[in-house]
Amino acid sequence: MSRKAPTQTHSQMVEEWKQEPEFKAAYDDLEMEFTLLRELLLARQTAGLTQAEVAEKMGTKPPAVTRLETALSDQRHSPTLATLKKYAHAVGCTLEVHLVPTKTAKAG
């Protein structure tokens, strides 16, 4: 059995799927989690650390770091701010949380 090469990249498929209102709404709802996951993975990569090394610096076990990074992509649970602060510190970063007004928010 031979496999055919994909005709589209993942990004191209996602862009095509975003044309469907239900998919776009679900995708947009996950944007914050995807952004945070990318930030965590990039920070760990930039620090040159493995999950095991991050776990050691956090005072936990490697499966906890795996669960943290995985949880953001599958919405099993939301990590606490304390956990995110520990992760940030372990990879040489500071955690910052910002509130950004939505386009529909009214002042006053």
Image (cartoon, rainbow, N blue to C red):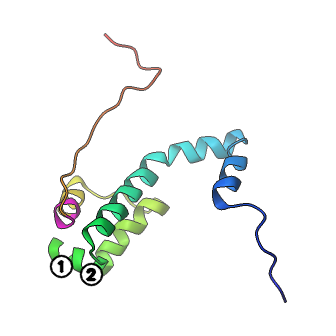
Residue 7 sits inside the magenta stretch: no
Q: Residues within 10 Å of mark 1 (few under 14, many from 20)?
A: some
Quarter-wise, where is residue 38 in the image?
A: bottom left
**Residue lying at 40% horizontally and 58% vertically, measured from the top left:** 37
Foreground pick, 4 / 74: 4
Residue ID for mark 1? 56
Regarding residue 59, the answer to whether it shows in the image is no
Magenta stretch, main secondary structure class: helix
Instruction: Tell me where residue 12 appears, x and y as whole percent.
Output: 69, 53
- State whether residue 67 is above or below residue 93: below
Q: Which residues are magenta?
A: 87-91
Instruction: Tell me where residue 16 appears, x and y as whole percent.
Output: 73, 48
CB under 8 Å between discs 1 and 2? yes
**Residue lying at 23% horizontally and 53% vertically, measured from the top left:** 81
Foreground pick, 46 / 105: 46
Instruction: Tell me where residue 99 appears, x and y as whole percent.
Output: 30, 33
Element under disc 2: helix
**Residue lying at 50% horizontally and 49% vertically, measured from the top left:** 30
Regarding residue 35, the answer to whether it shows in the image is yes
Residue ID for mark 2? 52
Residue lying furthest right: 1
Element under disc 1: helix
In space, the residues marked 1 and 2 are separated at their CA atoms by 6 Å
Query: Looking at the picture, which amino acid does disc 2 mark?
Result: Ala
Placement of the N terminus among the 4 image quadrants = bottom right
- State whether residue 92 is above or below residue 27: below
Query: Looking at the picture, which amino acid does disc 1 mark?
Result: Glu
- State whether residue 6 is above or below residue 99: below
Residue 73 is left or right of residue 1, and the answer is left
Label ID, residue 93: none
